[in-house]
Amino acid sequence: MIFDNHNRPITYLRLAVTDRCNLRCFYCMPEEGIKYLPKAQLLTYEEMERLVRVLAQLGVSKVRITGGEPFVRNGLMEFLEKLAHTEGIKDWHITTNGVLTAPHVPDLVRLGVGSVNLSLDTMDRERFRQITRRDELPAVQGTLDALLAHNVPVKLNAVVMEGKNIEDIPLLAELTRQHPIEVRFIEEMPFNGEGSHYPVLNWTHRRILDELRALYPDITKLPDPANSTSYTYQVPGHAGTIGIIAAFSRTFCGTCNRIRMTAQGTLKTCLYDNGVLDVRALMRSGATDDDLKAAFLKAFAHRPKNGFEAEQLRSPVTESMSTIGG
Ligand code: SAM
């Protein structure tokens, strides 16, 4: 296993397979004028297979597929088939908006997906349309139903936003009464693709918890899994759990075991850094696996201590979560 310069093991890769998305969530992307990467600048699936294999040899054992929206890239299922059989990868997961996912659920199960993170900020069709600028709530609900029907572990992720979906906190939390899912409320982060503003964070993890306590006075704290970014709670008697993720307050950096690869093959050793290694250029200039390993190890030896330090070392945030790989 490889440890970084702060003695944190690096075991978890989040791999963006595309920067494209079929939604336009206002907190993630501008409505118009998005400059998608030309195909030649995206990592090919072969390149992704190679870097997963090399990272697995360095101790990465968990992979999350993300984007952009993974299911908009052709050939995803064939790639997942390969990923599922990569030596050293013990579990793999996928993050999706659920618009195109439902028909693929049986194959995800067949390939042994560990869990699916489904992004869903609201249960209301009009609010969904306002937030995502697309009218796709029924499709997303179809994916949730399919995942539940196939007993896939589900984490339902909702960004909490003043004036947009506060009324959904109780509606989403109530899903845990019947369903064995984890509903996770996430602080909004500054990655909206416009670089224009830092959101004033009205809904901190503490305020989200206060709201949940007001709704469920007997809500109980559960132990958090190792390396978890989420504070886990449960309402007694509910089948599922509730998580709160301090994504903006960054309370979890001390145990961070994750790295990210953007769709164009830039390594990020922190969500808040500016990209620390151009892996695509290395691969396309003929680097051997050993060259790649050496470059990865060097990057892991210079990891910022936390998201605040990473942010200080860079130019202001301008990118979208969809290019970073959320
Ligand atoms: N398309 C997939 C999806 O929607 O799940 C994967 C990529 S998306 C960028 C991953 C996650 O990032 C989503 O749950 C989304 O809500 C979250 N996200 C995007 N922008 C964010 C922001 N500014 N603050 C907090 N979360 C954000």
Image (spheres, grey):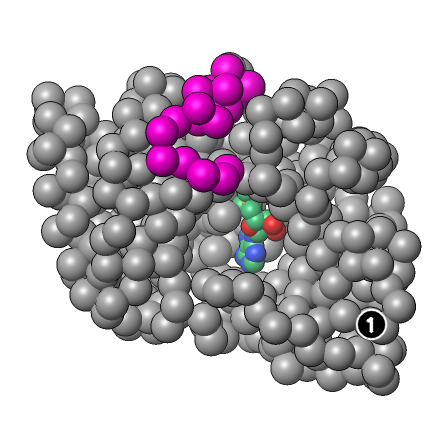
**Residue tagged by mark 1?**
235
In-image side of 107 versus 274 (left or right):
right
Three-letter residue code for mark 1: Val
- In this rendering, does residue 290 appear at all? yes
51 up-or-down from 12: above or below:
above
Q: Residues within 10 Å of mark 1 (few under 14, many from 20)?
A: many
Asked whether residue 91 is drawn in magenta, I would say yes
Residue at the spot 87% in from the left edge and 78% down from the top edge = 215
Nearer to us in this view, 191 or 300: 300
- Location of residue 280 in the rendering, given as x and y in whole percent from the top left corner: 23, 30
Q: Is mark 1 within 8 Å of ligand 1?
A: no
| 242 left or right of 172 in image | left
Closest to the observer, 167 or 58:
58
Is 221 on the left-hand or right-hand side of 302? right
Is residue 257 depicted above or below 107 in this figure?
below
Q: Is residue 36 left or right of residue 144?
A: left
- For the residue labelled by badge 1, is the local secondary structure a helix, a strand or a loop? loop
The residue shown at (50%, 69%) is 248
For residue 195, what is the image quadrant?
A: bottom left
Question: As displayed, is residue 214 above or below residue 248?
Answer: below
Which range is magenta?
Answer: 76-92
**Residue 304 in sight:** no
Residue 14 is situated, as x and y percent measured from the top left of the image, at 43, 44
Q: Which residue: 71% across, 31% down?
A: 99
x then y, percent, for residue 37: 38, 29
Q: How many labels does the image show?
A: 1
Residue 245 included in the magenta stretch of the image: no
Q: In which quarter of the view is residue 236 placed?
A: bottom right
Q: In this view, does 269 lie above or below 93?
A: below
Residue sitting at 45 percent across and 30 percent down? 17
Residue 241, image x, y percentages? 74, 63
